[in-house]
Amino acid sequence: MVSQPPQKRLSRTDRKEQTRRRLLESAAELFAAKGYAQTGLDEVAEKAGMTKGAVYSNFTSKADLALAVLDELALGPALAIFSQVDAGENFHDQHLHGGKLLVEAMDTSSLWFQVELQCALQAGRDEELRSRLRARDAALRSTLSASIAARIEKAGWAPTVELGVIVAALTAVASGIALQRLKDPNSVPTGMAGQLITAIYQHFAEPVGDIEETVND
């Protein structure tokens, strides 16, 4: 009989991370299926096979848990798209590639958008959640602004408006795409996402040479 190698015991840090991940995934499923307001922390703990104490040892409140779901299950993959698109590509090709990756991320983790919708609906009645969502969105816009500014500059383009305008347009389009594909994946074909992103950049930015020519004229 062949002996099995002993299983490696998880460290305290690994166990804590595993617990946190299970709670996040359970919360995401419940928030999406039942709604933010209708989901209790007891239910999250039960679904994850843990106690309510485990929830409070990782999150200070339901709002804290919901924001962690959005940040760790959605925001991280979304921001990772920037690192997956080669900044050396043609600027137009970057948009098409980025649009394809964005749609893939949306389809793979569609729960995140359902949770985002539930949180947005509840925010009008929950001051803590509303405040936390606004702070999160502000931080997201700041991060996106820095990434977009660096990519535009590297491509030899320059914005013709404040970067905040470009970020607002991109996030609005991304949210619209996610909503439509949640209802019908065929409503916004993958290629269309890249085309919409391209249209935004072309409307709010232009090659540096064009700007210089306009100034000289």
Image: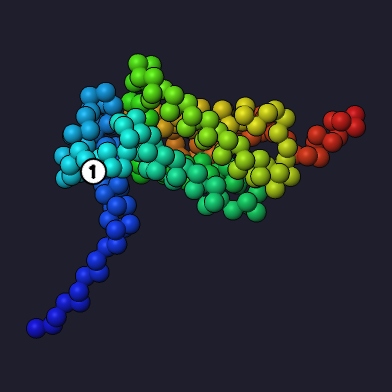
* Quadrant housing residue 51: top left
Q: Can you see residue 182?
A: no
Q: Which residue has dot 1 on it? A: 54
Q: Residue at x 72, y 40 (%)?
A: 157
Q: Position of residue 5 (x, y in %)?
A: 20, 77
Q: Residue at x 38, y 25 (%)?
A: 129
Residue extending farthest to the left is 1
Q: Position of residue 197 (x, y in %)?
A: 57, 35
Asked whether, in this view, residue 75 is left or right of residue 196, the answer is left
Q: Residue at x 62, y 27 (%)?
A: 165
Asked whether, in this view, residue 217 is left or right of residue 28, the answer is right
Residue extending farthest to the right is 216
How many numbered marks are there?
Answer: 1
Viewport quadrant of the N terminus: bottom left
Q: Can you see residue 46?
A: yes
Q: Residue at x 14, y 80 (%)?
A: 3
Q: Is residue 8 above or below residue 173?
A: below
